[in-house]
């Protein structure tokens, strides 16, 4: 296929002046010679016509947002006779790609991967022919298309005759974000009619573009919300934020801004509900807790609401502190079914109440991601509160570790916020150092003292916290639940070690959770846990996945009015391997709508792939924390599928990668993957412990990485020969 030449017009003639021409020339470009300017005019019935050379070409409108659609402006006829599905896909591919031009080899790699070159070229030619005639049914034989051109192996969707809605959206979005004007925001948002190509949710060639446009849409909504808030239109601003959360439920900043707007609108109960929604979605989707900013705003909202309620007549106020005892505000409350952990929970309770020499001052619950460590600590904290113990809940997210003694600050703030005003004044009088540390006890103290001599401040703070805990433990046991210990700051670790030593003679217990891989990566935390465990000051509980029986019970508890077939129960257990997080994801995906007591479930062969997609965020975060060698080895193992991969296959595959992975580095990476419980040893090699993890990890790989790993695994084994460098490694 040679260079395309437009045979319908002389290259040297200027176009005739069209009727009702608007504003002269709009665009001029070079296509292998002198090309006259393109002009735009109003045709019959208001249709838009573009004049190019001596011919008037109807404008082709391509819509990608909200669904694929192509229309020509000559009578607004929608293009529908594609004849071949590949022709439609080819047009989508060019319209989606930035610049609307791709080399023929790129098209072959994307649409016909792994197909022999001759066969792929044949399919490409048929798709191109069908696409051209779908867009121009009147196109004569052997006539070049004005819309789809192939020149020097470059396939181009001619932007002189084609308008793509994504281009217009990006242009208006750029203007709106630069001007920060409500009218500009409205104009840009009006052009976004939905997600890019929603009918192709699993096509990798449009995934990056879809995400980019969706993020741009979210940025516009956030900018619009801010502009409306500045104008005082809180209700409309809240509507923009709700739309952001509909698209990205885990965007915590939007939750926090919405809480603030609800409080400003005089509806604190809506702000409280928004906080609960935020906390639930972060825990469910990312296994995270809200940031300290969000928690502080929540406490401010509660304080404001309490202040308003205190001014109401007594007859209108709800009775306080009635019924069973509960943990202090900010503590944990049970959520959802909790099964299969009864023995572990009993062991934790025994450590809290026992007073003999076998008592440990600290308990660390470790295990793989999603096994239920945080859920166990929540249940333990709640039960401790019901048994009259005082629970100080330090949160479950890494946000609490971003400043010195962060987990203790969150725990003590929750305790102080739950006290009366008189009790808070007494706490400030007895423990003045806390007033500079706990916001509810009063304004921050002398900041210059805290910054000028931080060591002295921290020594004073630690001794004050110990005195407070000692006084609190005089009447009842104290449980200090610190949540996630990964990334704990040095001052907090010093305090934890000190409290664990003192707990031998005091009725308090420190508990925390850590993932296996985090414990391996955090040297200081690992050394602290190992040292205290050897000294019998710390008890480490390794939390395992649920048994088949407990898994079945959990599934039935999640669906109390549905009869679940035994084959489905077995499928869930096999794919989740008893991991509660994966069980929950699979249950949500397997369930086919309204519960049916007798009909059971409909099995869906794509359930694992869809469920894996919902866990992509968590998997991407874990991959980001790994080193490059470990990521490549795991990617290679994931590309091998759900079957085992032998050490020799891994060695062959890593040797075929560019750059190669030395054998010693491969073995080190395997050691870490086994320690992190991502892989496990099988009869003839290695496999992922959870098929769920393998599928999500594979989904996180870009297409070029998948192709690279598949090619490396398919590479022939090189003949054995001495390799001094590898042996030296």
Image (spheres, helix red, strand yellow):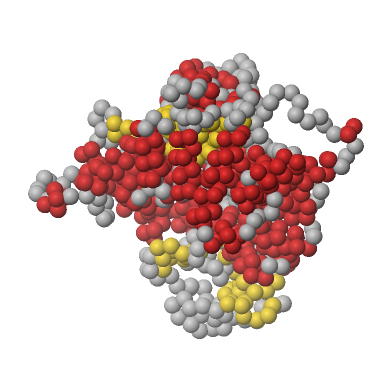
Residue furthest to the left: 722
* Residue in the foreground of this view, choosing between 501 and 287: 501
**Residue 347 shown left or right of residue 166 in the figure:** left
* Residue in the foreground of this view, choosing between 691 and 416: 416
Residue at 43% of width from left, 38% of height from top?
A: 515
Residue 289, visible in the rendered structure? no
In this rendering, the answer to whether 3 lies above or below 455 is below
Residue 369 quadrant = top left
Give residue 610's position: percent from left, percent from top. Answer: 51, 37
* Residue in the foreground of this view, choosing between 63 and 451: 451
Residue 8, visible in the rendered structure? yes
Please tell me how many numbered marks the rendered image carries. Answer: 0
**Residue 706 shown left or right of residue 320 in the figure:** left
Give residue 365's position: percent from left, percent from top. Answer: 46, 32
Residue 1 quadrant = bottom left
Give residue 417's position: percent from left, percent from top. Answer: 69, 42
Residue at 45% of width from left, 40% of height from top?
A: 497
**Residue 194 shown left or right of residue 375 in the figure:** right
Residue at 48% of width from left, 19% of height from top?
A: 343
* Residue in the foreground of this view, choosing between 331 and 66: 331
Give residue 448's position: percent from left, percent from top. Answer: 59, 62
Residue at 32% of width from left, 41% of height from top?
A: 672
């Amino acid at each position: 296929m040679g260079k395309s030449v437009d045979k319908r017009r002389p290259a040297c003639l200027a176009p005739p002046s069209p009727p009702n021409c608007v504003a002269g020339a709009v665009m001029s470009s070079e296509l292998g010679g002198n090309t006259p300017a393109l002009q735009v005019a109003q045709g019959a019935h208001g249709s838009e016509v573009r004049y190019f050379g001596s011919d008037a070409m109807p404008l082709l409108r391509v819509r990608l947002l909200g669904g694929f659609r192509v229309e020509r402006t000559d009578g607004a006829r929608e293009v529908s006779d594609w004849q071949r599905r590949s022709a439609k896909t080819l047009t989508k591919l060019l319209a989606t790609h930035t610049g609307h031009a791709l080399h023929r080899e790129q098209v072959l790699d994307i649409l016909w991967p792994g197909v022999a070159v001759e066969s792929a070229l044949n399919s490409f030619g048929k798709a191109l022919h069908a696409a051209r005639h779908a867009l121009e049914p009147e196109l004569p034989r052997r006539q070049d298309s004005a819309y789809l051109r192939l020149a020097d192996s470059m396939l181009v969707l001619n932007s002189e005759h084609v308008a793509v809605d994504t281009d217009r959206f990006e242009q208006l979005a750029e203007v709106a974000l630069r001007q920060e004007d409500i009218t500009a925001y409205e104009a840009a948002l009006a052009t976004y009619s939905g997600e890019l190509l929603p009918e192709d949710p699993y096509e990798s060639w449009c995934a990056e573009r879809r995400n980019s446009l969706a993020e741009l849409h979210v940025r516009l909504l956030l900018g619009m919300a801010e502009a409306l808030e500045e104008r005082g239109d809180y209700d409309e601003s809240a509507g923009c934020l709700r739309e952001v959360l509909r698209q990205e439920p885990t965007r915590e900043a939007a939750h926090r801004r919405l809480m603030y707007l609800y409080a400003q609108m005089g509806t604190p109960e809506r702000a409280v509900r928004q906080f609960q929604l935020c906390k639930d979605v972060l825990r469910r989707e990312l296994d995270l807790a809200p940031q300290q900013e969000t928690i502080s705003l929540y406490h401010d909202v509660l304080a404001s609401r309490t202040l308003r309620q205190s001014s109401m007549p007594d007859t209108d106020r709800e009775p306080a502190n009635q019924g069973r005892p509960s943990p202090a505000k900010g503590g944990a409350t049970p959520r959802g079914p909790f099964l299969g952990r009864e023995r572990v929970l009993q062991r934790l309770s025994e450590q809290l109440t026992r007073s003999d020499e076998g008592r440990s001052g600290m308990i660390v619950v470790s295990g793989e991601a999603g096994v239920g460590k945080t859920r166990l600590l929540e249940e333990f904290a709640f039960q401790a509160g019901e048994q009259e113990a005082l629970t100080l809940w330090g949160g479950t997210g890494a946000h609490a570790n971003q400043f010195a003694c962060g987990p203790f600050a969150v725990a003590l703030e929750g305790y102080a916020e739950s006290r009366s005003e008189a009790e808070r004044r007494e706490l400030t009088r007895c423990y003045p150092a806390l007033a500079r540390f706990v916001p509810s006890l009063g304004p921050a103290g002398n900041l210059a003292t805290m910054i000028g001599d931080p060591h002295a401040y921290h020594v004073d703070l630690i001794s004050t916290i110990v005195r407070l805990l000692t006084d609190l433990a005089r009447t009842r046991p104290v449980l200090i639940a610190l949540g996630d210990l990964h990334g704990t700051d040095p001052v907090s670790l010093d305090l934890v070690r000190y409290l664990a030593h003192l707990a031998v003679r005091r009725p308090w217990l420190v508990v925390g959770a850590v993932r296996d891989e985090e414990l391996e990566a955090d040297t200081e935390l690992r050394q602290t846990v190992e040292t205290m465990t050897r000294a019998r000051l710390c008890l480490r509980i390794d939390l395992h996945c649920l048994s088949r029986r407990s898994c079945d019970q959990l599934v039935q508890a999640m669906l109390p009015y549905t009869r679940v077939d035994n084959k489905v129960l077995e499928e869930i257990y096999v794919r989740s391997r008893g991991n509660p997080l994966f069980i929950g994801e699979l249950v949500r995906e397997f369930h086919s709508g309204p519960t049916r007591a007798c009909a059971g479930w409909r099995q869906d062969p794509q359930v694992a792939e869809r469920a894996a997609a919902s866990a992509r965020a968590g998997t991407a975060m874990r991959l980001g924390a790994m080193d490059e060698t470990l990521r490549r080895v795991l990617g290679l193992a994931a590309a091998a599928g759900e079957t085992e991969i032998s050490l020799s296959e891994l060695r062959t595959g890593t040797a075929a990668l560019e750059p190669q992975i030395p054998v010693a580095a491969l073995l080190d990476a395997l050691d870490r993957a086994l320690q992190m419980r991502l892989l496990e040893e099988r009869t003839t090699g290695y496999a992922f412990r959870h098929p769920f993890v393998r599928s999500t990890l594979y989904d996180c790989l870009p297409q070029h990485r998948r192709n690279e790993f598949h090619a490396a695994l398919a590479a022939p084994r090189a003949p054995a020969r001495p390799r001094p460098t590898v042996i030296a490694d």
